[in-house]
Image (cartoon, grey):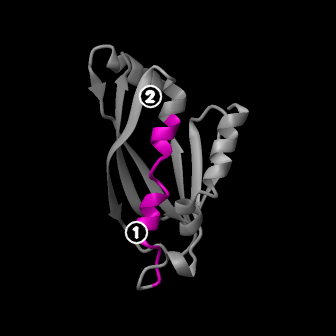
C-alpha cells in the first residue's frame, strides 16, 4: 500500500457518514485483501429500542469490497457497487465488527472470467458480528466489474 492509499483509508475514519455513525476502519492490509471495520454503539447510532441502527450497520459495509477491488484489479477495470441486501439476524447491543476478505485466486478468477464476458457481477457476503462473535447481520454486495476498453 502506498502512502496515498494509506492516507485515504485514515481520512475515511473522519468522513462525516462514518464518523457520525461511529464507524471506524481498524485495519487495512498492505495488499488490500483484508479490511476490518467496527461500529461502537453510541446513543446517536441506536434505534428506538436501543440497539444498533440498521442504517449504520449497512453503512459500515458499504464501500469496502468496491474499494478493495479497485485497488486489486488496477486501472484497467471499472468497479462499482451495484446492489446490496441486508438480513438482520439478531439485535446489535454491543460494539460490532465486519471483516472483508478477498483472495488472490478470487481476483485472478474475476480477471479470467472477464476475458469471455462483457461484465461480471459477483456477489460477496460480509457478516457483521458482535463482540462475542455472534452474527447480527449478513450483507450481500453485488459488485459490477467491467474491463475498460
Please determine whether, in this image, residue 54 is positioned above or below residue 146. Answer: below
**42 relative to 80 in the view: left or right:** right
- Residue identifier under label 2: 106
In the rendering, at what x and y percent does residue 8 appear? 64, 43
Please determine whether, in this image, residue 121 is positioned above or below residue 27. Answer: above
In the rendering, at what x and y percent does residue 137 appear? 40, 62
Residue 102 lies in the magenta stretch: no
Residue 131 visible to an observer of this rendering: no
**125 relative to 30 in the view: left or right:** left
Question: Helix, strand, or loop for circle 2?
Answer: helix
Which residue shows up at 47% across the image and 47% down it?
63
Please determine whether, in this image, residue 69 is positioned above or below residue 97. Answer: above
Q: Which residues are magenta?
A: 50-68
Question: Helix, strand, or loop for circle 1?
Answer: helix
**Which comes before the other along the chain, label 2 or label 1?**
1
Q: Quadrant of the C terminus?
A: top left
Which residue shows up at 58% across the image and 41% down it?
34
Q: Residues within 10 Å of mark 1 (few under 14, many from 20)?
A: some
- Residue identifier under label 1: 54
**85 relative to 108 in the view: left or right:** left
Which residue shows up at 45% across the image and 39% down it?
66
User: Residue 13 falls in which quadrant of the image?
Assistant: bottom right
Amino acid at each position: 500500500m502506498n502512502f496515498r492509499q494509506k492516507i485515504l483509508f485514515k481520512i475515511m475514519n473522519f468522513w462525516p457518514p462514518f464518523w457520525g455513525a461511529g464507524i471506524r476502519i481498524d485495519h487495512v492490509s498492505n495488499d488490500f485483501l483484508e479490511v476490518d471495520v467496527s461500529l461502537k454503539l453510541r446513543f446517536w447510532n441506536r434505534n428506538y429500542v436501543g440497539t444498533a441502527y440498521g442504517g449504520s450497520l449497512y453503512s459500515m459495509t458499504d464501500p469496502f469490497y468496491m474499494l478493495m477491488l479497485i485497488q486489486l484489479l488496477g486501472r484497467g477495470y471499472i468497479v462499482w457497487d451495484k446492489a446490496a441486501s441486508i438480513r438482520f439476524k439478531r439485535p446489535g447491543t454491543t460494539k460490532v465488527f465486519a471483516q472483508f476478505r478477498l483472495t488472490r485466486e478470487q481476483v485472478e478468477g474475476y480477471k479470467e472470467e472477464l476475458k469471455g464476458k462483457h461484465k461480471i457481477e459477483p456477489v460477496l457476503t460480509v457478516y457483521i458480528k458482535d463482540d462475542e462473535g455472534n452474527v447480527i447481520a449478513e450483507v450481500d454486495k453485488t459488485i459490477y466489474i467491467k474491463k475498460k476498453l
